């Protein structure tokens, strides 16, 4: 059976390493890196995410600046807050928790964030930097996926990878990162023909679909590495996009859900915030 990739343990180690580097940064710079998180409305899942991001930020020795706005906030008010945060020297990272209430213009808000404080990596400037190999910010979830992949496959050169899903937040940046690692990358999506045959070719499968247990065990090439990004609430609890019970018998290594990709996402957000503070102060980041 497959090696289980322990995302929780990897994330805990990364967070501890970041905390050490943050302590050194504070010593040198005389200030703490600051992450501003903006939450509009009271979506319960978003509230939970924002709370755990705040806690993790403080645990890493950074400052968490939280802005909670009422659900009926208008575009102008939200954009004005983003401008204030852009101009605030104590703020190294700005994160607007998505999804925003439907009446708000998500694209306009993401465009308003200073790309050099865009620690989520969602600004088109950062998408372009990633696509062209320039330093910028990489979205946290795919960044965490690559770290987990490299924990079992240190050199990805020449491997065949299939990314299932083409969202701007996961699938597309994941494909870019794998190209940069010299994989041969196929991006599959809802209109792909004969997906099982595509997945069967892959040494690396990244599933970011949002359908519980969608990828079956007999689609997996024996020995392949499987990274499951999906988070699906079912009657049986949280499950991924991969049928774990089947795939674990075939794969060489696989991430569980929960306890795989999820914990790495917040750790990578802390990493991006620390790196942003270093860049803004003109000091070398230690990771
Ligand atoms: P999305 O809905 O934006 O994108 C889903 C993608 O799946 C689309 O590109 C679509 O083309 C593809 N797809 C849909 N049906 C398909 C089918 N039948 N065959 C092949 N492809 C199909 O979702 P997203 O934001 O990319 O998130 C994907 C999953 O990852 C969700 O379960 C989400 O909850 C989870 N997620 C987890 C984390 C984390 O931290 N672990 C972060 C972000 C998203």
Image (cartoon, rainbow, N blue to C red):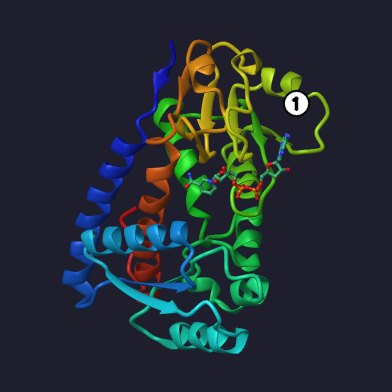
Q: Secondary structure at mark 1?
A: helix
Q: Residue furthest left?
A: 27
Q: Residue at x 49, y 66 (%)?
A: 97
Q: Quadrant of residue 200?
A: top right
Q: What is the crowding at mark 1: few (fewer than 14 residues within 10 Å), some, or many (at least 20)? A: some
Q: Position of residue 2 (x, y in %)?
A: 44, 15
The residue at which mark 1 appears reads as 195
Number of numbered discs visible in the structure rendering: 1
Look at the image and tell me whether residue 251 can be seen.
no
Q: Residue at x 75, y 19 (%)?
A: 197
The correct choice, above or below, for 74 with respect to 276 in the image is below
Residue 77 is left or right of residue 20, and the answer is right
Q: Residue at x 62, y 19 (%)?
A: 216
Tell me if the residue at label 1 has its CB under 8 Å from ligand 1: yes
The correct choice, above or below, for 9 with respect to 17 in the image is above
Residue 79 is left or right of residue 51, and the answer is right
The correct choice, above or below, for 236 with respect to 145 in the image is above
Q: Position of residue 247 (x, y in %)?
A: 53, 17
Quarter of the image with the N terminus is top left
Residue 218 is left or right of residue 145, and the answer is right
Along the line of sight, the residue nearer the viewer: 52 or 200: 52
Q: Position of residue 77 (x, y in %)?
A: 54, 88
Q: Position of residue 61 (x, y in %)?
A: 21, 64
Along the line of sight, the residue nearer the viewer: 233 or 1: 233
Q: Quadrant of ligand 1?
A: top right
The correct choice, above or below, for 253 with respect to 81 in the image is above
């Amino acid at each position: 059976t497959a090696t289980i990739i322990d995302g929780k343990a990897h994330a805990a180690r990364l967070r501890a390493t970041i905390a050490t580097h943050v302590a050194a940064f504070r010593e040198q710079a005389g200030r703490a890196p600051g992450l501003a998180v903006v939450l509009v409305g009271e979506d319960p899942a978003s509230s939970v995410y924002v709370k755990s991001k705040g806690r993790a930020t403080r645990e890493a020795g950074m400052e968490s600046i939280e802005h909670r706005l009422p659900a009926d906030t208008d575009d102008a008010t939200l954009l004005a807050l983003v401008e204030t945060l852009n101009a605030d020297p104590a703020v190294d990272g700005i994160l607007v928790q998505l999804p925003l209430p439907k009446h708000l213009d998500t694209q306009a808000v993401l465009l308003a964030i200073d790309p050099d404080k865009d620690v989520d990596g969602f600004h088109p400037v950062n998408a372009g930097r990633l696509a062209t190999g320039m330093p910028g910010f990489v979205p946290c979830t795919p960044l965490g996926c690559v770290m987990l992949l490299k924990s079992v496959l240190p050199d990805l050169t020449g491997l065949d990878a299939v990314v299932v899903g083409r969202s701007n937040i996961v699938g597309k940046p994941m494909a870019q990162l794998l190209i940069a690692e010299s994989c041969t990358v196929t991006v599959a999506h809802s209109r792909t023909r004969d997906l099982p045959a595509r997945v069967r070719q892959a040494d690396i499968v990244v599933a970011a679909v949002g359908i519980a247990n969608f990828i079956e065990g007999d689609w997996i090439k024996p020995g392949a590495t499987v990274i499951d990004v999906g988070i699906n609430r079912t009657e049986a609890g949280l499950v991924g996009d991969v049928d774990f019970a089947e795939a674990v018998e075939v794969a060489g290594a696989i991430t569980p859900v929960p306890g795989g990709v999820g914990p790495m996402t917040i750790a990578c957000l802390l990493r991006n915030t620390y790196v942003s503070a270093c860049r803004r102060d003109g000091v070398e980041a230690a990771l």
